[in-house]
Amino acid sequence: MPGDLNQYGFLFGGKMLSWVDEACWIAASLDYPQCQFVTVGMAKVEFHHGVGEGVILEIDCRKKKQGDTSVSYEVAVSRGRCDGETVIFSTCVSFVNVDKNGDKCSIS
C-alpha cells in the first residue's frame, strides 16, 4: 500500500520486519496456545530484493528449534503466488515464553 512505501516507491524495511515478527508470533501462538510469547531476537536482517507498490507477499514461518522456555522460527518472505521462488527476505525469529510478571517460564 502507498503508506507502506518510502520516497522511492519501495517498501519500508521496518514494515517488513513488523509483518515477519507478527506472522511468526501467530505461528508460535498456534503451536503453543498456552504460552505468552515475546520476541527476543531476529537473526541476520538482510533484504535481497526491493518490493514495490501492489506486490503481494507470502510469509512462510516454520518451527526451527524449541528449548525449555523459547522457540525459534525460520521465515522466508517471497512474492506471492506468481513468483514464489524469489525470496525477498529471510531470517530466524526467536521468542521466549513469559509469565504475568514478564519472567521466563517453561513452554510445557
Image: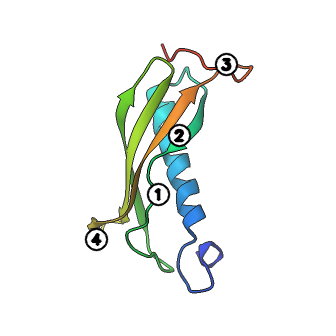
Looking at the rendered structure, the secondary structure element under dot 1 is loop
Cα–Cα gap, marks 1 and 3: 29 Å
Residue at 48% in and 80% down: 52
For marks 1 and 3 on the same chain, the one whose residue lies earlier in the sequence: 1
Secondary structure, mark 4, is strand
Residue identifier under label 1: 45
Residue located 45% across and 75% down the image: 51
What residue type is disc 1 on? Val
Quadrant of the rendered image containing residue 62: top left
- Can you tell which mark lies on residue 25? 2
Q: Which residue is mark 4?
A: 83
Label 3 CA crowd tier, 10 Å (few <14, some 14–19, many 20+): few
**Distance in Å between CA atoms under marks 4 and 1:** 22 Å
Q: Earlier in the sequence, mark 4 or mark 1?
A: 1
On the image, numbered disc 3 is attached to which residue? Answer: 99
Instruction: Residue 68: give x, y in percent of width and height.
Output: 46, 17
Are the two marked residues, 1 and 3, in contact with CB atoms closer than 8 angstroms? no
Q: Amino acid at mark 3?
A: Asp
Residues marked 2 and 1 touching at CB (< 8 Å): no
- Quadrant (top left, top right, bottom left, bottom right) of the N terminus: bottom right
**Label pair 2/3, CB-CB below 8 angstroms:** no
Of 89 and 59, the residue lying toward us = 89
Look at the numbered discs 4 and 2 and tell me whether their residues touch, using CB distance below 8 Å. Answer: no
Earlier-in-chain disc, 2 versus 3: 2
Label 2, secondary structure: give it: helix
**What's under tag 2, amino acid-wise?**
Trp
